Image: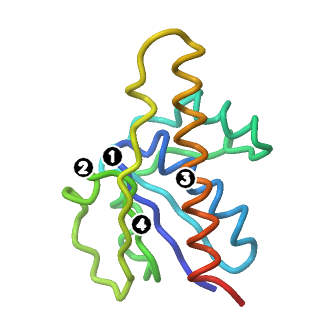
Amino acid sequence: MKKILILCTGNSCRSQIAEGYLRHFAGNRAEVYSAGVETHGVNPRAIATMKEDGIDISGHTSNHVDEYRDIDFDYVITVCDNARERCPYFPTKAQKFHYNFPDPAKATGTEEAIMAEFRAVREMIKSYCEQFVAEHLSA
């Protein structure tokens, strides 16, 4: 079984959404973890927008990357430029991937406008995760 780590700055939105979708699409073909170079707690809007798509991430926790130093990951995916730049060295054979998704937590305006940004980013991450599983975890 493959081990995947998704890294973001605060492990509150993008990496949490990606963890949810990678778990969903990979099923029993991978163990999926997410972490941040900081921890900001799981964003309630990320939980809400995932619930709209039928995926429950309400039990996720915001974890610091140092918690996973002893795990030999197969894949490390950074989902923001800041995490890629600040990502600590992992003594691992892991293949590294990067995609800089917009940060929906920085959206401003009405609640409707902010949730629209969360949904847009969710859909980008969903497509990325579905494609990643098809390319790297196919049976």
* Depth check, front residue: 65 or 4: 4
Quadrant where the image shows the C terminus: bottom right
Residue that appears at 43% across and 29% down: 105
The percent position of residue 43, horizontal first and vertical second, equals 52, 31
- Residue 9: numbered disc: 1
Q: How many marks?
A: 4
Distance, label 1 to label 2, CA atoms, is 6 Å
Q: Quadrant of residue 26?
A: bottom right
Nearer-N-terminus badge (1/2)? 1
Mark 3: amino acid:
Ile
Nearer the observer, disc 4 or disc 1?
4
What residue would you read off at disc 2? 82
- Residue 125: numbered disc: 3
Nearer the observer, disc 2 or disc 3?
3
Label 2–label 4 contact, CB within 8 A: no
- Residue 77: numbered disc: 4
Distance, label 4 to label 1, CA atoms, is 12 Å
